[in-house]
Image: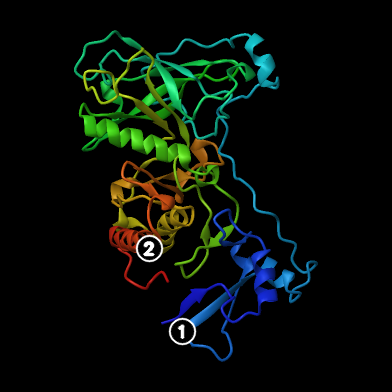
Amino acid sequence: MSHIREPGKSCPPSVLESILRTKRTTEGCAWGDSLDNFFTSKPDGEDYAWTDVWTTSVLQELGVMGSDILREPEMRVRAPWPVLKFPQATASDSDAAAEPQRLHVDPFQTDEFPKLAESIAIEYLPEALCVHDPDHRVSGNQATGAVIHYKRLYPRPELRPEAHPQYTGHLYLTRQSRLGCGHHSNVYRASFQLPAPLETQHVAVVAKIAVPRPEARDFLNHEAAIYNSFPEHLAHEYSGYALVPGLKYPVPVGAVVPKFFGYYVPAHQGYDARNTAEPSPILLLEECGSPVDPQTLSHDNKAECFSLFLRLHLSGFLQKSAFKKNILVQPGPLTVPPPQRSSQSPSFRVIDFGRAFARPSKNPKEWMDEREMEVRDVQKVLRIPRHSMH
């Protein structure tokens, strides 16, 4: 059995230093623009069970390959196909911008609205949210009006509110738009109307709402805090391939988690999230498809799904709920218009972080033990034979 690794175990410090200066993902994985940028070799005088993997940038840094032989592009973000039109004016000028003309649509019919997959800068994210809830999806045990006013808790508002206008968005929920339910929450496909100056009609997002139990509210609040603490790169897709420690071969550098569009709580004074008679908080996320079926996944697809958890670990987080329902897939790539996407180019995400925790909250041994347990859980869920990936 052969194990894959980056070279470095037997390298002198100067060589190792050169290797670490080469092209890498934000998590620190060796990166190449294509599979042709990865090379393997057997180390001399070492255990036959190891195979070293070299990238073009490593060989060029060490002087083994000239930079003129293969010019490799830099790693770049692969932006999703746009559905938003951002204004040209600066944020300070935008408060005077006119409301764009909007066509009349039924905001409760979400099936035809495009999914929102783009990042929204905090200056354009609504600080206030009008939730249109005729079916009382968020209202707990207390009857409320059809419109409930919310405020954004995460991401935290800017320290200087005068730095940009405070925008108001609209969210539309119906019973028919429910995507799924769990022990602690219900998930809806919701219509999200972003405020001017974003020139857009309604877009579709996921709205996650706690069931009326105090512990369910706690889980949702914890999940929102985890999303708020994720580094931005985890929600971005990048060009090229990465050699992720724990895998035998490079995998695409896809987004690990959905994009986070805010965590909102009712705006009235004295709101108590654990009082289930009060409306539930709302977590807004990117809609990322349906749960995977491990029986239909190719070996490469399984490796890519597995890599998402490994990269999450490298970024300092454990998901702690490794079930197939929490690994989503949708046709891709997301860089092209929806009609051109195909299940032959799938896009994967890991979801559900109500039990997740960050590395600083655990001592090193506990972290490693929990990490190894999660690795085994993911392999079991994806039906990956032991040692087949590493």
Q: How is the image coloured?
A: rainbow
Quadrant into which the N terminus falls: bottom left
Residue named by callout 1: 49
**As shown in the figure, which amino acid type bears the numbered disc 1?**
Ala
Contact, mark 2 vs mark 1 (Cβ under 8 Å) = no
* Quadrant assignment for the C terminus: bottom left
Task: Give the residue number, with chain letter if any, for mark 2.
Answer: 368
Residue appearing at x 32%, y 56% in the figure: 296
Which residue is most to the bottom? Answer: 45
Can you give x and y, in whole percent of width and height, for residue 212 in the image? 21, 26
Residue 183 x %, y %: 21, 38
Q: Residue at x 63, y 24 (%)?
A: 86
- Apparent side of residue 123 relative to residue 245 in the rendered image (left or right): right
Given residues 275 and 220, the one toward you in this image is: 275
Q: Residues within 10 Å of mark 2 (few under 14, many from 20)?
A: some
Q: Residue at x 23, y 34 (%)?
A: 215
Mark closest to the chain's N terminus, 2 or 1: 1
